[in-house]
């Protein structure tokens, strides 16, 4: 594979992802990167986010609402989607448990398991608090 040419725009996108825990959409990344690169197009942001995901420098999270979210944290971890506000949260589970899931799956599969992606669904604390406030 040919060496990828350095891009200041891609570096800015990667830096933004590395410094947020919000799991932003491409639109959100676009709004933030535009502050540094006012002429950047949304298409350029999409292409670079997908390239970063393909290179393993970001994680692309496909959510049920149809929007892809992106995560700069590429260490093995799970995500929770709030079914009320659609925000995505990191779920920190010991990596040994993640590896156990791979081994368990491999025991029931005629082949090898390299990795897996799992989304959990629930209601975040902010939405639970708002619901409790409305009911009071």
Image (tube, rainbow, N blue to C red):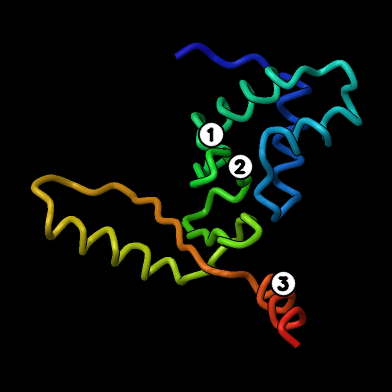
Q: Secondary structure at mark 2?
A: strand
Front one among 1 and 73: 73
| Mark nearer the viewer, 3 or 2 | 3
Q: Dot 2 surroundings within 10 Å: few (below 14), some, or many (20 or more)?
A: many
**Quadrant, the C terminus:** bottom right
- For label 3, the SS is helix
Q: Nearer the viewer, residue 117 or 14?
A: 117
Q: Nearer the viewer, mark 1 or mark 3?
A: 3
Q: Which one is in front in this view, the residue at disc 2 or the one at disc 1?
A: 2
Q: Residue at x 27, y 58 (%)?
A: 102
Which residue matches tag 2?
70
Residue 36 vs 28, above or below: the answer is above
Tell me, for residue 126, which label it has, or none: 3
- The image shows residue 22 at horizontal and vertical percentages of 70, 53
Q: Give the residue pinned by disc 1.
A: 53
Tag shown at residue 113: none
Is residue 19 found left or right of 111 in the rendered image? Answer: right
Q: Quadrant of residue 36?
A: top right
Q: Earlier in the sequence, mark 2 or mark 1?
A: 1
Q: Residues within 10 Å of mark 1 (few under 14, many from 20)?
A: some
Q: Nearer the viewer, residue 132 or 26?
A: 132
Task: Judge from the rendering whether residue 21 lies leftward or rightward of residue 112; answer left or right.
Answer: right
Q: What's the residue at 71%, 26% (across, down)?
A: 10
Q: Answer yes or no: do the residues labelled 2 and 1 have beta carbons within 8 Å?
A: yes
Q: Compare marks 1 and 3 and give the one earlier in the sequence.
A: 1
Q: Is residue 113 left or right of residue 23?
A: left
* Percent coordinates x, y for residue 43 in the rendering: 68, 18
Q: Are marks 1 and 3 in contact (CB under 8 Å)?
A: no
Mark closer to the chain start, 3 or 2: 2
């Amino acid at each position: 594979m040919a060496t990828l040419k350095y891009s200041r725009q891609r570096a800015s996108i990667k830096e933004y992802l590395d410094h947020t825990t919000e799991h932003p959409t491409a639109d959100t990344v676009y709004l933030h990167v535009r502050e540094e690169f006012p002429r950047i197009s949304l298409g350029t942001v999409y292409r670079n986010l997908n390239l970063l995901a393909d290179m393993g420098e970001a994680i692309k999270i496909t959510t049920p609402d149809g929007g892809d979210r992106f995560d700069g944290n590429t260490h093995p971890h799970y995500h929770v989607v709030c079914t009320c506000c659609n925000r995505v949260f990191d779920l920190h589970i010991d990596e040994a448990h993640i590896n156990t899931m791979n081994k368990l799956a491999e025991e029931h599969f005629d082949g090898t398991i390299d990795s897996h992606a799992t989304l959990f669904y629930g209601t975040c604390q902010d939405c639970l608090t708002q619901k409790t406030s409305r009911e009071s």
